Image: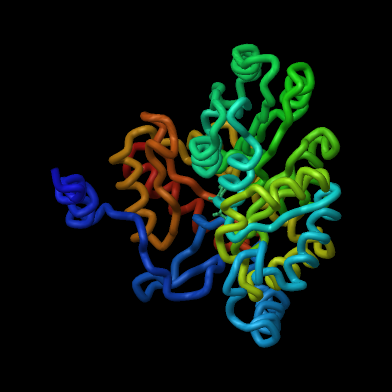
Amino acid sequence: MDIFEKCWNFTQAEEARKAGYYPYFTPIQSQQDTEVVLNGRRIIMIGSNNYLGLTTHPKVKEAAMQALKKFGTSCTGSRFLNGTIELHVQLEERLAQFTGKEAALVFSTGFQTNLGTISALVGRHDTVIIDYDDHASIVDGCQLCFGKTVRFKHNDMDSLRKALESTNPRSGKLVVVDGVFSMEGDIAPLPEIVSICKEFNARLMVDDAHAIGVLGERGNGTASYFGLTEEVDIIMGTFSKSFASLGGFIAAKAQVIDYIKHFSRALIFSASMPPASIAACLASLDIMENEPERRERLWEITRKMHREFRNLGFDIGNTQTPIIPIIIGDDMKVFQFWKRLLEEGVFVNPVRNPAVPVGRALLRTSYMATHTDEQLERVLETFEKVGKELGVI
Ligand SMILES: Cc1ncc(COP(=O)(O)O)c(C=O)c1O
Protein backbone atom coordinates (compact mmCIF):
# COMPACT_ATOMS: atom_id res chain seq x y z
CA MET A 1 0.00 0.00 0.00
CA ASP A 2 1.18 3.54 -0.80
CA ILE A 3 1.96 5.44 2.40
CA PHE A 4 0.36 8.49 0.71
CA GLU A 5 -2.99 6.69 0.27
CA LYS A 6 -4.42 8.57 3.26
CA CYS A 7 -3.38 11.89 1.68
CA TRP A 8 -5.07 11.08 -1.65
CA ASN A 9 -8.22 10.15 0.30
CA PHE A 10 -8.22 13.29 2.49
CA THR A 11 -10.71 15.58 0.76
CA GLN A 12 -12.47 17.30 3.68
CA ALA A 13 -10.24 20.39 3.71
CA GLU A 14 -10.58 20.91 -0.05
CA GLU A 15 -14.36 20.45 0.15
CA ALA A 16 -14.54 23.04 2.95
CA ARG A 17 -12.36 25.45 0.92
CA LYS A 18 -14.65 25.10 -2.09
CA ALA A 19 -17.74 25.62 0.06
CA GLY A 20 -16.15 28.73 1.61
CA TYR A 21 -16.12 27.31 5.15
CA TYR A 22 -12.39 26.74 5.63
CA PRO A 23 -11.18 28.76 8.65
CA TYR A 24 -7.56 27.65 9.04
CA PHE A 25 -4.13 29.01 8.08
CA THR A 26 -5.49 32.40 6.98
CA PRO A 27 -2.55 34.82 6.60
CA ILE A 28 -2.82 37.99 8.67
CA GLN A 29 -1.31 41.03 6.95
CA SER A 30 -0.58 43.20 10.00
CA GLN A 31 0.81 42.96 13.51
CA GLN A 32 -1.23 41.01 16.07
CA ASP A 33 -3.34 43.63 17.80
CA THR A 34 -6.94 44.30 18.83
CA GLU A 35 -7.59 44.83 15.11
CA VAL A 36 -5.79 42.97 12.32
CA VAL A 37 -5.77 43.15 8.52
CA LEU A 38 -7.09 40.08 6.73
CA ASN A 39 -7.63 39.99 2.97
CA GLY A 40 -7.00 43.74 2.97
CA ARG A 41 -9.78 44.46 5.53
CA ARG A 42 -9.42 45.64 9.13
CA ILE A 43 -11.28 43.36 11.51
CA ILE A 44 -11.58 43.08 15.28
CA MET A 45 -9.45 40.28 16.77
CA ILE A 46 -11.09 38.27 19.55
CA GLY A 47 -9.32 35.04 18.68
CA SER A 48 -5.81 35.50 20.08
CA ASN A 49 -4.02 34.59 23.32
CA ASN A 50 -2.51 38.05 23.54
CA TYR A 51 -4.16 38.66 26.93
CA LEU A 52 -2.17 41.73 27.94
CA GLY A 53 -1.84 43.11 24.41
CA LEU A 54 1.96 43.23 24.64
CA THR A 55 2.79 42.14 21.06
CA THR A 56 2.73 45.80 19.99
CA HIS A 57 4.10 47.38 23.17
CA PRO A 58 6.97 49.74 22.24
CA LYS A 59 9.18 48.51 25.13
CA VAL A 60 8.73 44.86 24.13
CA LYS A 61 9.49 45.57 20.48
CA GLU A 62 12.51 47.72 21.36
CA ALA A 63 13.92 45.03 23.69
CA ALA A 64 13.60 42.43 20.92
CA MET A 65 15.35 44.74 18.43
CA GLN A 66 18.22 45.51 20.81
CA ALA A 67 18.77 41.78 21.51
CA LEU A 68 18.73 41.05 17.80
CA LYS A 69 21.41 43.71 17.27
CA LYS A 70 23.62 42.48 20.12
CA PHE A 71 23.19 38.68 19.87
CA GLY A 72 22.13 38.13 16.24
CA THR A 73 19.19 36.22 14.83
CA SER A 74 19.65 32.76 16.31
CA CYS A 75 21.55 30.76 18.93
CA THR A 76 22.18 27.98 16.36
CA GLY A 77 22.26 25.21 18.92
CA SER A 78 20.82 23.60 22.02
CA ARG A 79 20.81 25.08 25.50
CA PHE A 80 22.95 22.08 26.44
CA LEU A 81 25.84 23.05 24.16
CA ASN A 82 26.43 26.34 22.39
CA GLY A 83 22.85 27.68 22.59
CA THR A 84 22.74 29.28 26.05
CA ILE A 85 23.25 33.03 26.12
CA GLU A 86 23.20 35.23 29.21
CA LEU A 87 19.61 36.30 28.45
CA HIS A 88 18.35 32.70 28.92
CA VAL A 89 19.92 32.60 32.36
CA GLN A 90 18.53 36.03 33.29
CA LEU A 91 15.06 35.00 32.17
CA GLU A 92 15.24 31.78 34.21
CA GLU A 93 16.25 33.69 37.33
CA ARG A 94 13.43 36.19 36.85
CA LEU A 95 10.86 33.44 36.25
CA ALA A 96 11.89 31.54 39.37
CA GLN A 97 11.36 34.72 41.37
CA PHE A 98 8.08 35.53 39.61
CA THR A 99 6.56 32.09 40.21
CA GLY A 100 7.97 31.74 43.75
CA LYS A 101 10.03 28.65 42.93
CA GLU A 102 13.73 27.84 43.46
CA ALA A 103 14.63 27.55 39.77
CA ALA A 104 13.23 27.69 36.24
CA LEU A 105 14.15 26.28 32.84
CA VAL A 106 13.17 27.70 29.45
CA PHE A 107 12.38 25.62 26.35
CA SER A 108 11.89 26.70 22.72
CA THR A 109 8.10 26.29 22.71
CA GLY A 110 5.38 25.61 25.26
CA PHE A 111 4.55 22.38 23.44
CA GLN A 112 8.14 21.16 23.83
CA THR A 113 8.10 22.16 27.49
CA ASN A 114 5.31 19.69 28.23
CA LEU A 115 6.79 16.99 25.98
CA GLY A 116 10.25 17.39 27.47
CA THR A 117 9.18 17.62 31.10
CA ILE A 118 6.69 14.76 31.24
CA SER A 119 8.82 12.38 29.18
CA ALA A 120 11.90 13.12 31.30
CA LEU A 121 10.14 12.59 34.62
CA VAL A 122 7.73 9.72 34.04
CA GLY A 123 9.81 6.56 33.80
CA ARG A 124 8.94 2.91 33.15
CA HIS A 125 7.55 2.25 36.65
CA ASP A 126 5.76 5.59 37.04
CA THR A 127 2.22 6.78 36.27
CA VAL A 128 1.05 10.11 34.87
CA ILE A 129 -2.53 11.08 35.64
CA ILE A 130 -4.18 13.70 33.42
CA ASP A 131 -7.51 15.51 32.98
CA TYR A 132 -9.43 14.54 29.82
CA ASP A 133 -9.42 18.20 28.73
CA ASP A 134 -5.67 18.73 29.20
CA HIS A 135 -3.82 20.33 26.30
CA ALA A 136 -2.59 18.18 23.39
CA SER A 137 1.05 18.79 24.38
CA ILE A 138 0.40 17.12 27.75
CA VAL A 139 -1.29 14.16 26.05
CA ASP A 140 1.62 13.85 23.62
CA GLY A 141 4.14 14.13 26.48
CA CYS A 142 2.40 11.13 28.06
CA GLN A 143 2.59 9.19 24.79
CA LEU A 144 6.29 9.88 24.64
CA CYS A 145 7.06 8.68 28.17
CA PHE A 146 7.67 5.05 29.17
CA GLY A 147 5.26 5.09 32.12
CA LYS A 148 1.55 4.42 32.31
CA THR A 149 -1.05 7.12 31.58
CA VAL A 150 -4.41 7.30 33.37
CA ARG A 151 -7.04 9.93 32.49
CA PHE A 152 -9.77 11.35 34.70
CA LYS A 153 -13.02 13.17 33.88
CA HIS A 154 -12.66 16.90 33.41
CA ASN A 155 -12.37 18.70 36.78
CA ASP A 156 -14.09 15.71 38.46
CA MET A 157 -12.48 15.03 41.82
CA ASP A 158 -14.13 11.62 42.33
CA SER A 159 -12.74 10.56 38.99
CA LEU A 160 -9.26 11.86 39.95
CA ARG A 161 -9.41 9.90 43.20
CA LYS A 162 -10.46 6.72 41.36
CA ALA A 163 -7.64 7.22 38.87
CA LEU A 164 -5.11 7.47 41.71
CA GLU A 165 -6.61 4.48 43.49
CA SER A 166 -6.09 2.46 40.31
CA THR A 167 -2.33 3.09 40.32
CA ASN A 168 0.28 0.88 41.94
CA PRO A 169 0.92 2.46 45.40
CA ARG A 170 4.65 1.94 44.92
CA SER A 171 4.84 3.72 41.54
CA GLY A 172 5.91 7.35 41.24
CA LYS A 173 2.89 9.50 40.35
CA LEU A 174 2.59 12.82 38.52
CA VAL A 175 -0.79 14.56 38.15
CA VAL A 176 -0.86 17.13 35.32
CA VAL A 177 -3.67 19.65 34.84
CA ASP A 178 -4.20 22.88 32.94
CA GLY A 179 -4.56 25.78 35.40
CA VAL A 180 -6.99 27.50 33.01
CA PHE A 181 -8.50 25.20 30.38
CA SER A 182 -7.74 26.54 26.93
CA MET A 183 -11.05 25.98 25.16
CA GLU A 184 -13.68 26.71 27.81
CA GLY A 185 -11.83 29.02 30.19
CA ASP A 186 -12.64 27.19 33.43
CA ILE A 187 -10.10 26.92 36.26
CA ALA A 188 -8.78 23.66 37.77
CA PRO A 189 -9.93 23.29 41.42
CA LEU A 190 -6.38 23.25 42.80
CA PRO A 191 -7.25 23.17 46.53
CA GLU A 192 -9.05 19.81 46.06
CA ILE A 193 -6.45 18.51 43.61
CA VAL A 194 -3.61 19.37 45.99
CA SER A 195 -5.25 17.59 48.89
CA ILE A 196 -5.97 14.44 46.83
CA CYS A 197 -2.39 14.45 45.51
CA LYS A 198 -1.07 14.62 49.08
CA GLU A 199 -3.25 11.71 50.11
CA PHE A 200 -1.77 9.53 47.35
CA ASN A 201 1.76 10.90 47.54
CA ALA A 202 1.51 12.20 43.97
CA ARG A 203 3.38 15.22 42.61
CA LEU A 204 1.43 17.98 40.84
CA MET A 205 2.28 19.88 37.65
CA VAL A 206 0.09 22.79 36.50
CA ASP A 207 0.14 24.05 32.90
CA ASP A 208 -0.39 27.78 33.29
CA ALA A 209 -0.24 28.71 29.60
CA HIS A 210 -3.48 30.69 29.92
CA ALA A 211 -3.07 31.77 33.55
CA ILE A 212 0.26 33.60 33.58
CA GLY A 213 -0.39 37.33 33.22
CA VAL A 214 -4.07 36.71 33.96
CA LEU A 215 -4.56 34.98 37.34
CA GLY A 216 -2.83 35.52 40.67
CA GLU A 217 -1.90 38.53 42.71
CA ARG A 218 0.88 39.57 40.31
CA GLY A 219 -0.32 37.66 37.26
CA ASN A 220 1.86 34.79 38.42
CA GLY A 221 -0.65 32.03 37.79
CA THR A 222 -3.17 29.59 39.20
CA ALA A 223 -1.11 28.36 42.16
CA SER A 224 -0.68 31.92 43.39
CA TYR A 225 -4.40 32.65 42.76
CA PHE A 226 -5.28 29.87 45.21
CA GLY A 227 -2.37 30.62 47.59
CA LEU A 228 -0.83 27.22 46.78
CA THR A 229 2.55 28.12 45.33
CA GLU A 230 4.41 25.76 47.69
CA GLU A 231 2.01 22.87 47.08
CA VAL A 232 2.18 22.89 43.27
CA ASP A 233 5.41 21.05 42.49
CA ILE A 234 5.90 22.19 38.89
CA ILE A 235 4.51 25.37 37.34
CA MET A 236 4.63 25.34 33.55
CA GLY A 237 4.02 28.33 31.27
CA THR A 238 4.30 29.43 27.66
CA PHE A 239 5.63 32.65 26.20
CA SER A 240 3.25 32.62 23.23
CA LYS A 241 0.36 34.18 25.10
CA SER A 242 0.65 36.94 27.76
CA PHE A 243 4.42 37.15 27.20
CA ALA A 244 3.89 38.09 23.51
CA SER A 245 6.80 35.94 22.39
CA LEU A 246 7.56 32.27 21.71
CA GLY A 247 8.89 29.57 24.05
CA GLY A 248 7.96 27.97 27.35
CA PHE A 249 9.24 27.27 30.86
CA ILE A 250 8.89 25.19 33.98
CA ALA A 251 9.60 26.33 37.53
CA ALA A 252 10.21 23.93 40.44
CA LYS A 253 12.74 22.89 43.12
CA ALA A 254 16.32 23.39 41.89
CA GLN A 255 17.13 19.66 41.96
CA VAL A 256 14.08 18.81 39.86
CA ILE A 257 15.07 21.43 37.31
CA ASP A 258 18.65 20.16 37.29
CA TYR A 259 17.44 16.61 36.58
CA ILE A 260 15.15 17.72 33.74
CA LYS A 261 17.98 19.82 32.29
CA HIS A 262 20.04 16.66 31.87
CA PHE A 263 17.31 14.20 30.80
CA SER A 264 14.86 16.18 28.66
CA ARG A 265 15.41 15.24 25.03
CA ALA A 266 13.10 18.06 23.81
CA LEU A 267 15.49 20.49 25.54
CA ILE A 268 18.83 18.86 24.78
CA PHE A 269 18.21 17.96 21.13
CA SER A 270 16.54 21.16 19.96
CA ALA A 271 17.89 24.68 19.37
CA SER A 272 17.25 27.26 22.08
CA MET A 273 14.93 30.28 22.06
CA PRO A 274 16.37 33.04 19.83
CA PRO A 275 17.68 36.26 21.43
CA ALA A 276 14.84 38.53 20.29
CA SER A 277 12.22 36.16 21.76
CA ILE A 278 13.98 36.01 25.15
CA ALA A 279 14.37 39.77 25.30
CA ALA A 280 10.66 40.20 24.47
CA CYS A 281 9.83 37.91 27.42
CA LEU A 282 12.05 39.85 29.80
CA ALA A 283 10.42 43.14 28.76
CA SER A 284 6.92 41.62 29.06
CA LEU A 285 7.76 40.37 32.53
CA ASP A 286 8.81 43.91 33.55
CA ILE A 287 5.46 45.20 32.31
CA MET A 288 3.48 42.42 34.05
CA GLU A 289 5.22 43.24 37.32
CA ASN A 290 5.00 47.02 37.02
CA GLU A 291 1.67 47.66 35.29
CA PRO A 292 -1.03 45.78 37.25
CA GLU A 293 -3.58 48.09 35.64
CA ARG A 294 -3.35 45.99 32.46
CA ARG A 295 -4.49 42.90 34.31
CA GLU A 296 -7.20 44.93 36.07
CA ARG A 297 -8.49 46.19 32.72
CA LEU A 298 -8.48 42.62 31.35
CA TRP A 299 -10.67 41.52 34.27
CA GLU A 300 -13.01 44.51 33.84
CA ILE A 301 -13.46 43.45 30.18
CA THR A 302 -13.86 39.80 31.18
CA ARG A 303 -16.65 40.54 33.67
CA LYS A 304 -18.42 42.78 31.15
CA MET A 305 -18.28 40.20 28.35
CA HIS A 306 -19.42 37.33 30.62
CA ARG A 307 -22.41 39.45 31.68
CA GLU A 308 -23.31 40.76 28.22
CA PHE A 309 -23.08 37.40 26.42
CA ARG A 310 -25.25 35.79 29.11
CA ASN A 311 -27.76 38.68 28.87
CA LEU A 312 -27.98 38.15 25.12
CA GLY A 313 -28.86 34.50 25.77
CA PHE A 314 -25.62 32.80 24.67
CA ASP A 315 -24.37 29.65 26.43
CA ILE A 316 -20.85 30.48 27.69
CA GLY A 317 -20.43 27.32 29.78
CA ASN A 318 -18.43 27.50 33.00
CA THR A 319 -15.85 30.05 31.97
CA GLN A 320 -14.21 32.00 34.78
CA THR A 321 -11.61 33.82 32.69
CA PRO A 322 -11.01 35.96 29.54
CA ILE A 323 -11.46 32.82 27.42
CA ILE A 324 -15.19 32.92 26.65
CA PRO A 325 -16.62 30.02 24.65
CA ILE A 326 -19.87 30.53 22.76
CA ILE A 327 -21.18 26.99 22.88
CA ILE A 328 -23.28 26.08 19.84
CA GLY A 329 -23.05 22.29 19.65
CA ASP A 330 -23.46 21.63 15.94
CA ASP A 331 -20.26 21.72 13.83
CA MET A 332 -21.84 23.19 10.69
CA LYS A 333 -23.63 25.92 12.63
CA VAL A 334 -20.32 26.88 14.22
CA PHE A 335 -18.71 27.27 10.79
CA GLN A 336 -21.69 29.29 9.52
CA PHE A 337 -21.48 31.53 12.58
CA TRP A 338 -17.71 31.94 12.19
CA LYS A 339 -18.10 32.89 8.50
CA ARG A 340 -20.84 35.45 9.14
CA LEU A 341 -18.80 37.02 11.96
CA LEU A 342 -15.82 37.33 9.61
CA GLU A 343 -18.00 38.96 6.94
CA GLU A 344 -19.18 41.41 9.60
CA GLY A 345 -15.57 42.15 10.66
CA VAL A 346 -14.96 39.97 13.75
CA PHE A 347 -12.27 37.24 13.97
CA VAL A 348 -13.00 34.25 16.26
CA ASN A 349 -11.84 30.63 16.32
CA PRO A 350 -14.32 27.88 15.43
CA VAL A 351 -13.59 24.80 17.56
CA ARG A 352 -14.86 21.27 17.02
CA ASN A 353 -13.96 17.72 18.02
CA PRO A 354 -11.25 16.58 18.85
CA ALA A 355 -10.43 19.91 20.56
CA VAL A 356 -13.82 19.69 22.37
CA PRO A 357 -16.15 16.71 22.95
CA VAL A 358 -18.47 15.69 20.08
CA GLY A 359 -21.64 17.82 20.14
CA ARG A 360 -19.96 20.69 21.98
CA ALA A 361 -18.61 22.68 19.02
CA LEU A 362 -18.03 26.28 19.98
CA LEU A 363 -16.65 29.66 18.99
CA ARG A 364 -13.64 30.41 21.17
CA THR A 365 -13.48 34.11 21.96
CA SER A 366 -10.75 35.68 24.11
CA TYR A 367 -9.99 39.21 25.18
CA MET A 368 -7.08 41.59 25.49
CA ALA A 369 -6.43 44.30 28.07
CA THR A 370 -6.09 46.71 25.14
CA HIS A 371 -9.53 46.14 23.57
CA THR A 372 -11.48 49.42 23.60
CA ASP A 373 -15.06 49.74 24.85
CA GLU A 374 -16.08 50.67 21.32
CA GLN A 375 -14.55 47.49 19.87
CA LEU A 376 -16.31 45.39 22.50
CA GLU A 377 -19.67 47.04 21.75
CA ARG A 378 -19.18 46.25 18.06
CA VAL A 379 -18.40 42.63 18.95
CA LEU A 380 -21.58 42.32 21.04
CA GLU A 381 -23.77 43.98 18.39
CA THR A 382 -22.36 41.63 15.74
CA PHE A 383 -22.91 38.54 17.91
CA GLU A 384 -26.48 39.63 18.60
CA LYS A 385 -27.17 40.19 14.89
CA VAL A 386 -25.64 36.89 13.70
CA GLY A 387 -26.94 34.92 16.69
CA LYS A 388 -30.52 35.96 15.85
CA GLU A 389 -30.03 35.42 12.12
CA LEU A 390 -28.88 31.81 12.71
CA GLY A 391 -31.39 31.06 15.46
CA VAL A 392 -28.73 30.55 18.13
CA ILE A 393 -30.36 33.10 20.44
C1 LIG B 1 -2.64 24.81 27.79
C2 LIG B 1 -1.55 24.90 26.78
N1 LIG B 1 -0.38 24.29 27.00
C3 LIG B 1 0.64 24.32 26.13
C4 LIG B 1 0.52 25.01 24.93
C5 LIG B 1 1.64 25.01 23.95
O1 LIG B 1 2.25 26.24 23.95
P1 LIG B 1 2.99 26.88 22.68
O2 LIG B 1 1.93 27.31 21.72
O3 LIG B 1 3.71 28.01 23.29
O4 LIG B 1 3.87 25.84 22.11
C6 LIG B 1 -0.67 25.70 24.66
C7 LIG B 1 -0.81 26.47 23.41
O5 LIG B 1 -1.65 26.30 22.60
C8 LIG B 1 -1.74 25.63 25.59
O6 LIG B 1 -2.91 26.21 25.33
Q: Decide if residue 287 is on the left or right side of residue 308.
A: right
For the question of whether residue 93 can be seen, the reply is yes
Quadrant assignment for the N terminus: top left
Classify 304 as above or below 92: above
On the image, the x and y values in percent for residue 147 come to: 56, 29
Residue at 55% over, 26% down: 148
Comparing 283 with 38, the one in front is 283
Q: Quadrant of residue 363?
A: top left
For the question of whether residue 313 can be seen, the reply is no
Q: Decide if residue 391 is on the left or right side of residue 188.
A: left
Residue at 72% over, 72% down: 85
Comparing 155 with 387, the one in front is 155
Q: Quadrant of residue 106?
A: bottom right
| Colour scheme shown | rainbow
Comparing 258 with 284, the one in front is 258
Residue at 20% over, 48% down: 3
User: Please, which residue is most extreme toward the bottom here?
Assistant: 69
Residue at 67% over, 73% down: 57
Q: How many labels were placed on the picture? A: 0
On the image, the x and y values in percent for residue 96 come to: 82, 54
Classify 319 as above or below 342: above
On the image, the x and y values in percent for residue 125 come to: 61, 25
On the image, the x and y values in percent for residue 132 come to: 52, 29
Quadrant assignment for the C terminus: top left
Comparing 52 with 72, the one in front is 72
Classify 361 as above or below 112: above
